[in-house]
Every structure is written in C-alpha cells, then in structure tokens.
C-alpha cells in the first residue's frame, strides 16, 4: 500500500511524514492554565498510547502555564493558538510545535515574527483549516465548499513559504465525511507537506467512530495521511483506542491482536460472545501483531484457522485449538479459552 511521499518533520522526537509511522494525536479539554488537571489528562493519553497532545491557548495565563507543563509532559505538546500572535511568540520558547492559521494572526510582520521564532527552535507549524471557520474571502467566493478549504490551505501555506518556512503540516477538517475526504484528496497532489487527518465535531463515541472509520480509514487506505486524531465527545482514552483500531484495520499499523470471530447465527454451538469478550479483554495490551480466530461452529472455523496464528473452533460441548492451521489440542469447552490464551502467549514467545 503506497503512501504519498511528503516532507518529514519532527515534533520533539516524533517524526511525521516521509516514511515515519502514522502517529496518533489528541487534545486536552481542561483549561491549560490548570496545570494539574491538564497534566493528569496528558498522562492519561500517554498511557493510552497517544503520540502527541495539543493544548489550547486562550490567554496569556495559558501560554505561560505551558512552560511548566513542558517540564513534566511525557508527550510532545502542540500549542493551539488563534488570532493573537503574541501567544505564539511566548510559547515558542518551550513548546514542541504550534498550530495556527497564519491568515488570522494579523499582518505580514506578525507572521514573520512567528516564523522567525519557530525557526530558532526548529518548531513545525500546523495549518488547521476548518470548514466552519474559513477566512471570509474564501467563504464569500466559494461558500463552505471543498474548494474553499483547499484554497484556504494553499493561501496559509504560502504566507509561511514567503518567509522561507517549510516545516508545515496541514489539516483540512469538516464535520461532513465526504467533504473531509474530498478536501484531502484534492489538496494532496498540490503540496509536499504531511497531512494531519481528522473529522471535526464528529460527535459521541458511536457516531465519531463511524465517521472517522469511513473518512480516516478510507484516506489511509489511499495512502493519504501522516498523523491523525479521532475527535470524540467523551473520554480521552476512547479517541486513542478508536484511532489505533482504524490504523490496524486499514492495514497501516501492524500492532496488536486482530480478532476474527463469526457473527451470531443459528449454527453456534457455544457461548461465543462470552468467549470473544474474554479473549478481547485478556489480549488488549498485547503489542505483537497476531491474527487470532474464535469461531462458534465448524462451517467456517477450519478455513479461518488456516490463516490465523492461533484459533479456536468450537463444537458441541468441546472444540479444537490450532496454530497456523495445525491441530494442537482437542478439549472440553470449559478448557478451551484458557488453553487458547496459553497458545497465544507461546506464539508471542516463539517470535521473540
């Protein structure tokens, strides 16, 4: 699966673009000036597997608080700034990257000041285009269209390029799935910069998961995207869990357990749902890429087992355990899952 080639930049020690792995981002929701709460959220994201965190800068207190946060944060921190270039100048002394729209921070003099400050510390700038907050000149000419989003991105990139700044990352977000995908596709051949993927204002977990899986998963499978965020109105950890699943199921990240299990149907000969839930819970922290199959009857089980590293095929009151399609045990149903988990552990050890 070929990825579009892009320039590569670094946010602290996380490489983005080029041949770097696709990173997962999120954003704290506390007031950044509340250092204790913000750090607690950053730590939650770190332990969930997040790669980069973004913090909002609404005022000078937020900007100054980031200095303390950067001393303690286990994750690279991006400062999210709108309208006031002075906040960008303050945080440029200690953050790892800045998110602005150059077109909304004032004059060319202000843009140059931010660019010069970022150059001094090799800080990348993310241009964040959002269909709900486009510059008036583009909305008046194109409406809230894909073309308006693309033209806004090109305009903002040129403002930085005119001052010789190329460490740029671009996002083109809309709450509309189709518009989001079309915008990224249209801009991709026009610029060399890495893309941050996201569907903005995607909603609660159920809806955000579906929207992000379609848009982000689809773009990733087309080779578009270098870093991403799943925006969810809900728990921070859920954003990371869903993002990791999209990366894995789109084929972009080979990490963790891929569970193959059959749907509920009249052929089931075991309590498949309980078995799958237990396997999912017991294997959730495994990083080794493995395909495991948990099947409830013999109709498709043997075929799926041939393609799985480890498999269960349930029968009536008993079942079989297989590794790489070879039978390793035939046991009563009550013993199958424990043996299955042991075989997974042995498979991981065999690859070490």
Image (cartoon, grey):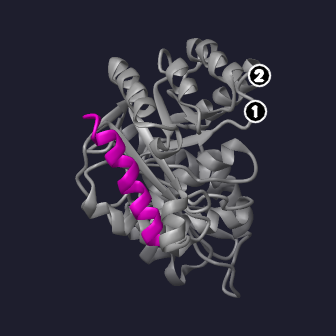
Residue positioned 50% across, 40% down in the render:
100
Residue 30 is tagged as 1
Q: Quadrant of the C terminus?
A: top left
| Residue located at (50% from left, 16% from top) | 94
Q: Which residues are magenta?
A: 146-165
Left or right of residue 203: residue 119: left
Q: Is residue 106 magenta?
A: no
Q: Residue furthest bottom?
A: 266
Residue 26 placement, left or right of 265: left
Q: Main secondary structure of the magenta part?
A: helix
Answer with the quarter of the image where residue 252 lies: bottom left
| Residue 254 appears in the picture as rendered | no
The vertical placement of 225 against 54, above or below, is below
- Label 2: state its secondary structure: loop
* Residue 245 pos. (x, y %): 53, 56
- Read off the residue under disc 2: 34
Q: Residue 228, position in %: x, y?
A: 49, 50
* Relative height, residue 184 to residue 31 (above, below): below
**Alpha-carbon distance for marks 2 and 1?**
7 Å
The mark found on residue 284 in the picture is none
At x 27% / y 40%, what residue is drawn?
162
Image quarter where the N terminus lies is bottom left
Q: Residue at x 39, y 60 (%)?
A: 251
Q: Are marks 2 and 1 in contact (CB under 8 Å)?
A: yes
Can you say whether 199 is above or below 20 in the image?
below
Q: Secondary structure at mark 1?
A: loop
Q: How many marks?
A: 2
Residue 65 visible from this viewpoint: yes
276 or 296: which is nearer to us?
A: 276
- The image position of residue 237, as x and y in percent, is 67, 43
Residue 115 placement: quadrant: top left
């Amino acid at each position: 699966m070929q990825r579009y080639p892009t320039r590569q930049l670094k946010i602290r020690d996380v490489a983005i673009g080029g041949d770097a792995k696709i990173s997962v981002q999120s954003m704290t929701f506390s007031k950044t000036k509340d250092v204790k709460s913000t750090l607690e959220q950053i730590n939650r994201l770190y332990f969930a597997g997040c790669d980069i965190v973004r913090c909002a800068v609404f005022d000078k207190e937020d900007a100054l608080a980031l200095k303390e946060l950067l001393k303690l944060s286990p994750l690279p921190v991006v400062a999210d700034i709108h309208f006031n270039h002075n906040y960008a100048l303050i945080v440029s002394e200690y953050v790892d990257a800045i998110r602005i729209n150059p077109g909304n921070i004032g004059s060319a003099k202000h843009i140059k000041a931010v660019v010069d400050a970022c150059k001094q510390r090799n800080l990348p700038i993310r241009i964040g285009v959002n269909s709900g907050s486009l510059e008036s000149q583009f909305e008046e000419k194109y409406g809230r269209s894909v073309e308006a989003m693309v033209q806004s991105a090109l305009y903002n990139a040129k403002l930085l390029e005119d001052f010789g700044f190329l460490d740029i990352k671009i996002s083109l977000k809309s709450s509309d799935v189709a518009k989001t995908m079309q915008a990224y596709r249209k801009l991709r051949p026009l610029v060399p910069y890495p893309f941050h993927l996201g569907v903005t204002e995607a909603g609660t977990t159920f809806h955000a998961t579906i929207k992000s899986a379609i848009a982000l998963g689809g773009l990733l499978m087309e080779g578009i995207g270098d870093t991403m965020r799943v925006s969810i109105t809900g728990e921070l950890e859920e954003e990371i869990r869903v993002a990791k699943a999209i990366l894995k199921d789109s084929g972009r990240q080979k990490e963790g357990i891929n569970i193959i299990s059959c749907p509920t149907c009249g052929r089931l000969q075991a309590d498949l749902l309980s078995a799958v839930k237990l396997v999912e819970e017991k294997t959730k922290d495994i990083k080794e890429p493995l395909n495991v199959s948990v099947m409830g009857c013999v109709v498709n089980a043997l075929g799926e087992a041939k393609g799985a590293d480890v498999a269960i095929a349930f029968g009536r009151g008993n079942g079989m355990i297989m590794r790489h399609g070879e039978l390793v045990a035939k046991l009563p149903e009550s013993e199958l899952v424990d043996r299955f988990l042991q075989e997974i552990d042995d498979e991981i050890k065999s690859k070490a």
